[in-house]
């Protein structure tokens, strides 16, 4: 199967694989597997914990989340 990515997305994927010392295809497979879970309710506690650990280890994702939180923190809801 061939999946076409936006150039920016491909660059981020390649950078992460290089940074982590991961095989590009294995990293892409792992990332896609995380979002293609058919029924999250069927995941074991260990699988859920591993998924959260993986997300927390993604420094770029965590930095983006922190930026988003800080950017919206203190805004009032109407």
Image: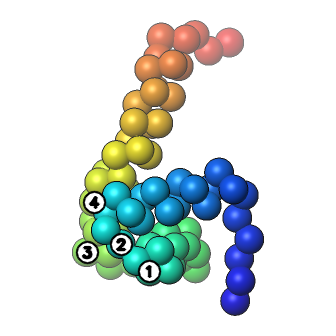
Lower sequence index among marks 2 and 3: 2
Which residue was labeled with disc 1? 26
Residue drawn 41% across the image and 65% down it: 17
Q: Is residue 58 above or below residue 70?
A: below
Lower sequence index among marks 4 and 3: 3
Contact between labelled residues 4 and 1, with CB atoms less than 8 Å apart = no
Asked whether residue 45 appears in the rendered view, the answer is no
Lower sequence index among marks 4 and 2: 2
- How far is the residue under mark 1 from the one under mark 2? 7 Å
Contact between labelled residues 2 and 1, with CB atoms less than 8 Å apart = yes
- How far is the residue under mark 3 from the one under mark 1? 21 Å
Residue drawn 44% across the image and 80% down it: 26
- How far is the residue under mark 2 from the one under mark 3? 22 Å
The image's mark for residue 53 is 4
Which of the two discs, 2 and 3, sits closer to the camera? 2
Q: What SS does tag 4 mark?
A: helix
Which residue was labeled with disc 2? 22
- How far is the residue under mark 4 from the one under mark 3? 10 Å
Which residue was labeled with disc 3? 46
Q: What SS does tag 3 mark?
A: helix
Lower sequence index among marks 3 and 1: 1
Between 56 and 49, the one nearer to me in the picture:
56
Q: Please rate how many residues cluster around mark 2, counting C-alpha atoms within 10 Å: few if below 14, some from 14 to 19, many from 20.
A: few
Residue drawn 62% across the image and 15% down it: 77
Q: Position of residue 6 (x, y in %)?
A: 72, 58
């Amino acid at each position: 199967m061939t999946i076409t990515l936006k150039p920016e997305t491909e660059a981020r994927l390649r950078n992460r694989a290089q940074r982590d010392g991961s095989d590009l295809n294995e990293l892409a497979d792992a990332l896609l597997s995380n979002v293609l879970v058919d029924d999250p309710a069927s995941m074991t506690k260990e699988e859920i914990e591993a998924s959260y650990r993986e997300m927390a280890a993604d420094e770029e994702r965590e930095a983006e989340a922190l930026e988003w939180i800080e950017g919206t923190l203190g805004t009032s809801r109407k």
